[in-house]
Amino acid sequence: MSELNGAQALPRQTFKTEEHTSVERMVAEFICQRNGPEWTYAAIGSDHPDREKSRVDGAFLKNGVITCFAEIKGCGRRWSDITDWTVAEKKVVAAQELFAIVRVPVLFIVRFNCGTIARLNALSNFTRIPNWGRTDRNSPGDVEVGARYRRELLTVMRENAS
């Protein structure tokens, strides 16, 4: 299947919910507050349900200068329960290509369901997982190649015990 661009309709609507948007906003606000008042977050594009979403959610800026790009993800598991974390390989490839062009770090920032937030450099080594993804929505678009990272490659930014 050829790569869709942002102007082409998808075979099915994307499943992004207000909850996903809320997690992105909360994580971005946490990182900006943690780093100080000179930090801001700029979202990239908008997520229309009938169009391919951007592979990177936004950029963090310090005094108006981009310090890193970020893809902010939610994870339904608790930090204490994981041995690894997996994301769609296409997101990793896009992040690595963006880095190759701009030479600014590209991070995956993950909020686990216990509240722990961790970051991962998109250039980190991963294991390729064929046929990875969700099956609970019965959508063929949810099963794809995954990129699995060992837990020790993630750096905790905020840890919650609950």
Image: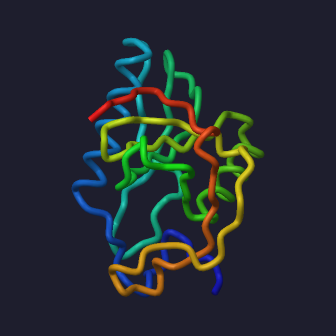
Residue 41 rendering spot, x and y as whole percentages: 41, 32
Q: Residue at x 43, y 81 (%)?
A: 9
Residue 82 rendering spot, x and y as whole percentages: 48, 49
Q: From what the image shows, is residue 93 above or below residue 65?
A: below
Query: As drawn, which residue projects farthest toward the left?
Result: 18
Q: Residue at x 44, y 81 (%)?
A: 10
Colour pattern of the rendering: rainbow
Question: Hey, which quadrant is residue 3 in on the image?
Answer: bottom right
Foreground: 161 or 128? 161
Please indicate whether residue 113 sits to the left or right of residue 124 in the image: left
Q: Residue at x 31, y 31 (%)?
A: 161
Question: Hey, which quadrant is residue 155 in on the image?
Answer: top right
Location of the C terminus (image quadrant): top left
Q: From what the image shows, is residue 42 above or below residue 49?
A: above
Residue 120 rendering spot, x and y as whole percentages: 59, 40
Location of the N terminus (image quadrant): bottom right
Foreground: 77 or 123? 77
Please indicate whether residue 96 sits to the left or right of residue 4 in the image: right
Foreground: 144 or 93? 144
Q: Residue at x 45, y 64 (%)?
A: 53
Please indicate whether residue 91 sits to the left or right of residue 103 in the image: left
Q: From what the image shows, is residue 7 above or below residue 12?
A: above
Count of marks placed on residues? 0
Foreground: 18 or 150? 150
Residue 6 rendering spot, x and y as whole percentages: 50, 69
